[in-house]
Image (cartoon, rainbow, N blue to C red):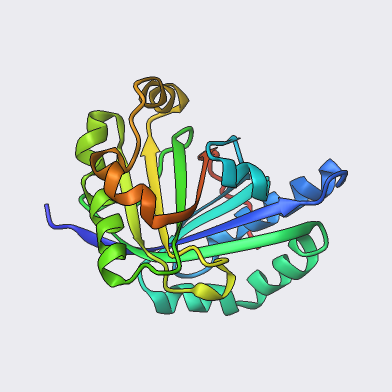
């Protein structure tokens, strides 16, 4: 089966301490309603299940949005849509103290880019050292290319690529999402000590200034009557 490409869009949010839970719920539900916009292949908004790196803990992101689009143009149309702008202004910005986002083009072996509800996903974002050039970035991307073979049948889907939207990325230039059937399968990988970059660990680790790793669960779809 021929591979297909899609644009990944990952946004991390840090909600202010002490924020009323009703406001957090409103942010998540309104973000999730944006799945009804034209061009959105999928959209998940959820709380961060756990931080898996020291940088993730230091940044302290509490929630995230993950969505996919066929093209950069469709992502741009989503970002500029009045409904999206309204949700950000009314429900996100008033309660968040920090936001970062990365976008990359990913290739998928299947013709489906959907994620089953209940899947466990691991987001990995990488900031390369200042002296790293294209060759070094290529080493990092190549390590991710071999990660699915390393992880074996445990991983259902692996997406990775170079960020093309640096404005809100805080210097992070490579992103990856590994999707597992559930938390149990993800935990099994952790118990075995398998790392996404294990195959070229000695080459890759010295090239990284910072590494954000965090997990989330894919929520169930909105009821058919929901939407903007």
- Which residue is located at x 61 percent, y 41 percent? 48
Relative image position of residue 76 (x, y in whole percent): 49, 78
**Which quadrant of the view contains residue 170?**
bottom right
Relative image position of residue 195 (x, y in whole percent): 35, 35
Residue nearer the viewer, 223 or 162? 162
**Residue 90 visible, this angle:** yes
- Which residue is located at x 42 percent, y 73 percent? 164
Left or right of 211: which side holds 28?
right
- Which residue is located at x 32 percent, y 50 percent? 204
Residue 219 vs 161, above or below: the answer is above
Residue 33 vs 37, above or below: the answer is above
Residue nearer the viewer, 116 or 196? 196
Residue nearer the viewer, 54 or 165? 54
Residue 38 vs 219, above or below: the answer is below
Left or right of 96: which side holds 167?
left
**Residue 223 visible, this angle:** no
């Amino acid at each position: 089966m021929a591979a297909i490409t899609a644009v990944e869009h990952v946004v991390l949010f840090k909600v202010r301490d002490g924020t009323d839970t009703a406001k957090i719920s409103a942010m998540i539900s309104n973000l999730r309603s944006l799945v009804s916009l034209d061009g959105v292949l999928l959209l998940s908004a959820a709380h961060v299940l756990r931080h898996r790196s020291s940088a993730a803990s230091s940044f302290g992101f509490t929630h995230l949005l993950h969505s996919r689009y066929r093209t950069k143009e469709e992502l741009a149309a989503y970002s500029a849509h009045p409904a999206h702008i309204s949700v950000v202004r009314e429900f996100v910005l008033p309660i968040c103290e920090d936001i970062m986002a990365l976008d990359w083009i990913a290739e998928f072996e299947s013709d489906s880019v959907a994620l089953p509800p209940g899947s466990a996903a691991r987001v990995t974002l990488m900031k390369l050292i200042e002296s790293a050039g294209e060759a070094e970035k290529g080493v990092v991307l190549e390590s991710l290319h071999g990660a699915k073979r390393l992880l074996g049948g445990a991983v259902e889907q692996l997406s990775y690529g170079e960020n093309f939207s640096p404005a809100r990325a805080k210097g992070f230039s490579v992103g990856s999402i590994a999707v597992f059937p559930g938390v149990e399968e993800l935990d099994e990988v952790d118990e075995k000590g398998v790392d996404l970059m294990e195959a070229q660990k000695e080459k890759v680790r010295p090239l990284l200034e910072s590494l954000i790793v965090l997990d989330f669960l894919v929520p169930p779809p909105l009821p058919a009557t929901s939407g903007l």
